[in-house]
Amino acid sequence: MLPVIHPLKPRDSNEHSKTATPLELFFDLVSVIVIAAAAAGLHHAISEAHTAQGIITFVMAFFAIWWAWMNYTWFASAYDNDDTLFRLLTILIMSGSLTMVAGIGPMFKSFDLKLVAIGYAVMRIVMIALWLRAAKNDSDRRSTLSPMQLVFALIFNLVCLPINIIAHQLIFKSNNQFVVTQH
């Protein structure tokens, strides 16, 4: 039986190799599902002659899932812990990914970002918790880990999301110009 909580410590840098756990592979698969949903939205946008809008929306969706996936992968490579709390938090991050999947269709159809933003927020908040958990037990990197999470949160919340929304509103002045039918 796995212990509920272990101290989260950095991986041994002298370790030759580490294989991905089944949970990490499942996390990758869930991320691929989001990308596939965004690719399907792009396909439908192009087939309906909304190529520019489709590309911009795809890039926004891809950036959100890629950024969250990359941060989790970086974390899982740097910190080796397979306790119950880590597994539960990973599953919670995957639920954020699946929430994003549910929001991809509305995002392409009418630029409704609610579900994508909620899913992304879940993923980022849980990742911030994981990084702060790592900082608690990694005294050598603590001074970097805690401010790094604040910077990640500020970059997305104060810069990236508003820029995407403003750019989209400038390019697509009305929702009527951005309607893609799903086949």
Image: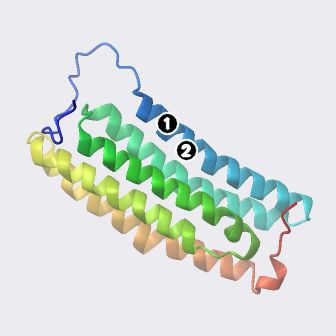
Q: In the rendered view, does 50 fall on the left or right side of 158? A: right
Q: Is residue 145 left or right of residue 163?
A: left
Classify mark 1: residues with Cα within 10 Å, few (<14), some (14-19) or many (20+).
Answer: some
Relative height, residue 113 to residue 7 (above, below): below
Q: Write down the quadrant of residue 100 in the picture.
A: bottom right
Q: Residue furthest top?
A: 16
Q: Is residue 131 above or below residue 26?
A: below
Residues under numbered marks 1 and 2 in contact, where contact means CB atoms less than 8 Å apart? yes
Task: Identify the coloring.
Answer: rainbow
Q: Is residue 144 visible?
A: no
Could you tell whether 87 is left or right of 59 in the image? left
| SS category of the residue bearing label 2 | helix
User: Neighbour class for label 2 at 10 Å: few (<14), some, many (≥20)?
Assistant: many
Mark 2: amino acid: Val
Residue 3 placement (x, y as % from top left): 17, 35
| View extreme (bottom): residue | 174
Element type at mark 1: helix
Residue under the point 11% across and 48% down: 136
> What residue is drawn where x is 45% and y is 43%?
70
Q: Residue 61 at what x, y percent from top left?
A: 61, 59
Which percent across, then down, holds residue 182?
A: 84, 64
Q: Quadrant of the N terminus?
A: top left
Where does the image place residue 23, in percent across and percent down from the top left? Answer: 42, 34
What is the C-alpha distance between the residues marked 1 and 2?
A: 6 Å
Residue 26 badge? 1
- Residue that numbered label 2 is attached to: 30
> Which amino acid type is shown beneath numbered disc 1?
Phe
Residue name at image x 18 percent, y 41 percent: 4
